[in-house]
Amino acid sequence: MASSQISSSHHIDFDSVFSMEDESLAPVFESLIKMGTIGGTAVEISESVFAATFELPSEGLTDLSEVPKNMVFDAQSLFSDSKEQVSISCFKKELKIEYRLLHDILAKTIYVKAGSFDAVTRDRFMLMTAITFDVKINWSTLLFGVLKAMVTPGYRQAKGLELGEPHAFPAPRVLN
C-alpha cells in the first residue's frame, strides 16, 4: 500500500477529488491548482506545503487530550443547558444552543464520520473546549490529519481517493 511508504505526505489523484460526490474538499484543491503548478499533474502534498498554502498555524497542541483539565472542567459547566455539568461524552441536546451549533460545525467538517450527529464525542468536546478557551492549536497537523484520513483507504472517512505510487517530481513541478 502506497500510504504505508509515505510518512508525512500523500499523493493525490486530483481527477478523483473533483469527481467526489461530496465536493466540500474540491475548493481546497482548486486553490492549489490556481497556484499554477499542479493542473493535470499528480502531486505530493506534505504537511508543510499544506500549512503554508492555507497559512495555518503550526504551533500549539497536536493532541487534544492535553487541553488543560481546569478548562475541561469549566467547559462542562459552561456548555451545559441545565445547572448540571455535562459529561465529556454527552448528547447534543444537553448543550446550550451556541455550543450545539459549534458541535454541528465540528461534526460536519472536521470530525466527519458515519452515524449520529446527536452524540458529542470526546474529541469534539475537547476541540470545542480548546476553541472556547482560546487554546493554541496546531491547525496544520490537525487538518492535515483530516486530509490524510480522507485519502487513506481503510479509514472510515476515506472518500474513495486513490493514492499513487510515491516518486520524485521534476524540480519545476515541486510546490514551494
Image (cartoon, rainbow, N blue to C red):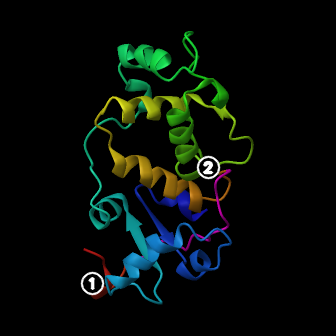
Residue contact between numbered discs 1 and 2, judged by CB atoms under 8 Å = no
Camera-nearest label, 1 or 2: 2
Q: Where does residue 46 sit, x and y in percent of width and height?
A: 37, 63
Measuring 31% from the left and 59% from the top, which residue is drawn there?
51
Q: Which residues are magenta?
A: 156-167
Magenta span: chief secondary structure: loop
Asked if 111 appears above or below 35 in the picture, the reply is above
For the residue pair 174 and 6, the one nearer the viewer reads as: 174
Q: Position of 39 compared to 35: left or right?
A: right
Q: Give the class, few, some or many, for how many residues have Cα within 10 Å of label 2's Cα (few <14, many ≥20).
A: some
Between disc 1 and disc 2, whose residue precedes? 2
The N terminus appears in which quarter of the rendering? bottom right
Q: List x then y, in percent, for residue 100.
A: 57, 36
Q: CA distance from mark 1 to mark 2?
A: 36 Å
**Where is mark 2, residue-wise?**
112
Quadrant where the image shows the C terminus:
bottom left
Q: Position of residue 53 (x, y in %)?
A: 30, 67
- In the drawing, does residue 170 fall left or right of residue 86? left
Look at label 2 and name its amino acid.
Answer: Val
Image quarter for residue 68? top left
The residue shown at (54%, 28%) is 96
Is the residue 27 above or below the residue 123 in the image? below
Q: Nearer the viewer, residue 174 or 107?
A: 107
Which sits in the foreground, 120 or 65? 120
| Secondary structure at numbered mark 1 | helix
Residue that lies at the very extreme toward the bottom in this rendered image:
40
Q: Is residue 48 above or below residue 19?
A: above
Q: Residue at x 30, y 55 (%)?
A: 56
Q: Which residue is mark 1?
A: 171
Tell me the kind of residue under disc 1: Ala
